[in-house]
Amino acid sequence: MMRRLMWLSQLFYFLLLLFSQYISSSSTSSSSFSSALLCSQHQSSALLQFKQLFSFSKEASSVCEEAGYRSYPKMKSWKADTDCCSWDGVRCDSTKGDVIGLDLSCSWLYGTVPSKSSLFHLPHLQHLNLACNYFNHSPISSGFGQFVRLKYLNLSYSMFSGQVPSELPNLSELATLDLSGYGNVSLETSVVKRLVQNLTKLRELHLDHVNMSSVSLSSLMNLSSTLTSLTLDSCFLRGRLLDHIFRLPNLQELSLAHNPELTWFFPTVNSSNALRVLDVSYTNYSGELPKSIGKLTFLSHLIMSGCNFSEPIPTWLGNLTQLTILNLSANNFGGQMPSSLSNLKELSSLDLRANNLNGTLPMWLGNLTRLTKILLGTNSFTGQLPSSLSNIKDLTFVGLRYNNFEGRIPDFLTNLTKLTSVFLSFNQLTSQFGEFQFSNSLEVLALDNNRLNGSIPKSISNLTNLNNLDLSANDLTSIVDLDMFKNLKKLKTVYFSHNLLHGKLPVVPSSVNSFLMERNRFSGEIPYTACNATFLTILDISRNNLRGTIPSCLGNISNFLSVMNLQGNHFHGTIPDTFAKGNRLRTLALADNYLEGLLPKSLVNCINLELLNLGKNMINDSFPYWLEALPKLQVLILRSNKFYGPIRNHKTGGMFFPKLRIFDLSHNDFIGSLPTQFFEQFKAIMTTNESEDGPKYIGEEYSNFGFSGTNLTENYILQVYRDSIIITMKGNEFALSSILTIFTIIDLSSNMFYGKIPETLGTLKFLRVLNLSHNSLTSHIPSSLANLTALESLDLSSNMLTGEIPMKLTSLTFLAVLNLSQNLLTGPIPQEKQFGTFQNTSYDGNPGLCGFPLSMKCSSDESPPPRPSIVQEDNGSMFARGFGWKAVLIGYGCGLVFGLAVGYVAFKTEKPHWLVRFVEGERNGKTRRPNNKRLGRRRT
Ligand SMILES: *[C@@H]1O[C@H](CO)[C@@H](O)[C@H](O)[C@H]1NC(C)=O
Ligand SMILES: *[C@@H]1O[C@H](CO)[C@@H](O)[C@H](O)[C@H]1NC(C)=O
Ligand SMILES: *[C@@H]1O[C@H](CO)[C@@H](O)[C@H](O)[C@H]1NC(C)=O
Ligand SMILES: *[C@@H]1O[C@H](CO)[C@@H](O)[C@H](O)[C@H]1NC(C)=O
Ligand SMILES: *[C@@H]1O[C@H](CO)[C@@H](O)[C@H](O)[C@H]1NC(C)=O
Ligand SMILES: *[C@@H]1O[C@H](CO)[C@@H](O)[C@H](O)[C@H]1NC(C)=O
């Protein structure tokens, strides 16, 4: 994301240039063609022939649209028998009629430019711009080297690939060269050397995302002193950058961002140094911020994120009085903000996110009246927000989340009329704010994860520009005004989850795509207005007191609906049989209600379904074989219903729950022998191991803003919806708030299965939890279970199993929970490895068992000494990295799996870029509000 934004900001810069070029070129051409018909026949036909190379497709220039710029097929208007000098994008010399300029940027070109192309028959070209088209991974033709008069060449973001041709250095007149792209073009040292040698008039050189990993940095030694702008972002540069680059006499812009193997040292410079823009983000530098930067008196942009700078922010930064943009985010700066920063009167954007800054926000911040963006999130600031912020009239964006700010909702939210985005999430703001008047300009208001209480402010219903509203995880108690969203026609996301709101659910606005109200006390029925929300993507109204039946529209409300979570309410009646073909439902969670009747057959239309949770209802049906072809189904939970009958082996025509990892049929009335064949076919459980880059969660990231590159907000609001389920272990229920894709569970407990435990279970190599308890299984424990080397919990209790415990089971080195109690097992208990750690309770009620930990000694046994517990090394387990089962059992009363899941999240939050939300624990149905709301801290 960061890269993409960085890149986009580059693109913006470039498009700006492009736009100004365009303006100037079109004004020139219109003045020139007013005189006479100028264009020669051969130029005309060369251009028309060139046009033949392409088809025109908007996608080819989608990058322009994404960045908010217009694109259109300029060439489409080119017609034979008209003056080519008047064609869109063509510019001619006003006296001779030579084509000297061609600007086909953002022109939908889709095709390739071969070296024999007629384009190269335009020898007078001085200006050529083909940026932002799609040349289909073709190489940059050597033909470009023929335009010896060329002063401007722009081939950026156009899907060229391969080596930059060795003919390019022939363009010795070039003032601007832009080959930036998507990382498919590469440059060799020899070509760089010749470029540097021959392009002595170069003023702007942009090679962002050109692969220069093999380029020796010494080849940049003699870069032309005419250079004013040099950007080498994401070029895979390696080694130490030569100091002299920072001293190029005319250089105003230098960008080296995202070259993690590039080291540099800022040399001493004198105050006449021309640098205005310096971006060295995410390069390899650590230590103090180099002092000599303080000599750059013209500097307006200083961007140094992700460089491992530590220490306090140096006071001398206050010398850079021309700064408009200061970005020191994602470093390790500590201490307080130095007051010298109050000299930076020109500052428009201050970004110090993700450091270790502390203290209160100083009053003088309000003296920086040019500020439009304040980004101080993910630090350790404390205290109240200074009232002086309301002096900063142009403020549009305030990002202060993940700090320890306290006190009332700040006043600046009232009287700053340009304010659009406010992120105060994850602080300690208190106060009743029911009467608060919010500034009408707000588009994004995120006050979630604070301690706000009382009612939801009425003035929110006046914020007609509001897109996103997040008040979740506070202590709000009121009844919500049913019509509060009536005038908010742009509202896309509404999150009121985890509060104490009651009364009826508010009317669902038809523009909304995410509507999250879970864990409140809403009562009444699902409002029929939900059926009008045709953009609805996530609907989560779980864990409330809602009643009534599920409206039949819900199955086909929206073509976008991906998550429907209604669990933990009092819904009754049948599940509507209205799931339409082509729906995108990924999660359907209806557990813990009073639903009855048959499973709706239209569920087979939900081919995107990953999670189907119908547990704890009264559904009365036989086993739904017909779900076996759902290609993405990972979680199937039918527990605690009235499912009945045998589960027969049957021949399948291919697909058989190909992705299923969690299979819970417990607490039903299934009968007969265990379905041997099933266990041989659960492909996902046989192959699911932790992936290279760590575990993944079932769930998705949703960007609520679509793609809007200019907007920092995109970086901010990236919502993760994580499914949660309840699993049983050792007789207790645990909520699993985030389902790791490596969780693999088979739970067939509390049914009426009889007969043998099939040997075939042994093929499920990556099974973690197996529960067959409370059935009527007989015969021996198959020794093939020893093949389940990932197994962490095994429960075979309350059956009629006989024989000895297979010694081979000692090879289950991750086994942390074992229950074999209430069977008819006999003989000695294995003593090796994990088996030394289990208690009596694991074996109770088997009169024929003997040996430690039971008091009954085995007859042949000379009273073996009790073994010391061997606490396993946990490093292969899904709960690894510091949070093993033992640690959790001892240290965290809040429940096994909860602790484990949280542990995992806590250890993982450094890495992911998404927000880890809703880390929530629950045990035996009793909700608890975790005090570690703040786990997702290191988000920038
Ligand atoms: C420099 O450019 C000229 C033509 O402009 C060309 O003849 C010459 O070979 C180039 N030199 C190098 C070192 O590329
Ligand atoms: C900052 O300015 C002060 C006063 O003009 C000067 O004494 C100091 O040397 C400057 N610091 C740096 C690092 O340039
Ligand atoms: C603020 O940060 C500095 C530097 O990291 C540290 O020495 C100081 O103890 C911190 N102060 C507080 C109140 O945490
Ligand atoms: C901020 O502005 C106020 C009023 O103009 C002034 O009194 C104060 O000295 C300024 N503070 C700083 C640190 O510049
Ligand atoms: C905003 O309101 C505060 C008081 O609430 C006031 O002191 C300040 O002058 C106002 N600022 C502007 C720009 O209106
Ligand atoms: C909405 O705005 C109008 C006009 O500014 C104002 O009169 C009214 O009190 C506001 N409503 C609420 C609930 O704040």
Image (cartoon, helix red, strand yellow):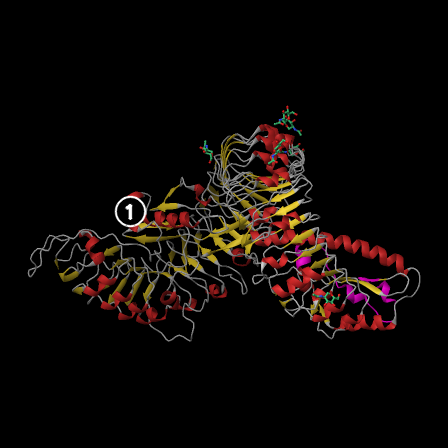
Near mark 1 (Cα within 10 A), the count class, few <14, some 14-19 or many ≥20, is some
Q: Is residue 806 visible?
A: no
Magenta residues span 63-91
Relative to the observer, which residue lies in front, 40 or 275? Answer: 275
Determine the residue positioned at 77% across, 52% down: 20
712 left or right of 668?
right
**Which residue appears farthest toward the right when viewing the image?**
36
The image position of residue 721, as x and y in percent, is 49, 52
The image position of residue 82, as x and y in percent, is 88, 68
Can you identify the residue that label 1 sits on?
889
Q: Is residue 610 visible?
A: yes
Number of marks in picture: 1
Determine the residue positioned at 29% across, 47% down: 887
Q: In which quadrant of the rendered view does residue 169 lie? A: bottom right
Disc 1 CB within 8 Å of nearest ligand 3 atom: no
Above or below: residue 424 compared with residue 54: above
Above or below: residue 875 compared with residue 43: above
Relative to the observer, which residue lies in front, 32 or 862? Answer: 32
Q: In which quadrant of the rendered view does residue 932 lie? A: top left
Q: Is residue 371 magenta?
A: no
857 left or right of 637?
left
Q: Is residue 81 magenta?
A: yes
771 left or right of 124?
left
Q: Quadrant of ligand 4?
A: top right
The image position of residue 602, as x and y in percent, is 48, 64
Above or below: residue 835 compared with residue 496: below
The image position of residue 674, as x and y in percent, is 29, 67
Question: Callout 1, which amino acid?
Answer: Leu
**Disc 1 on helix, strand or loop?**
helix
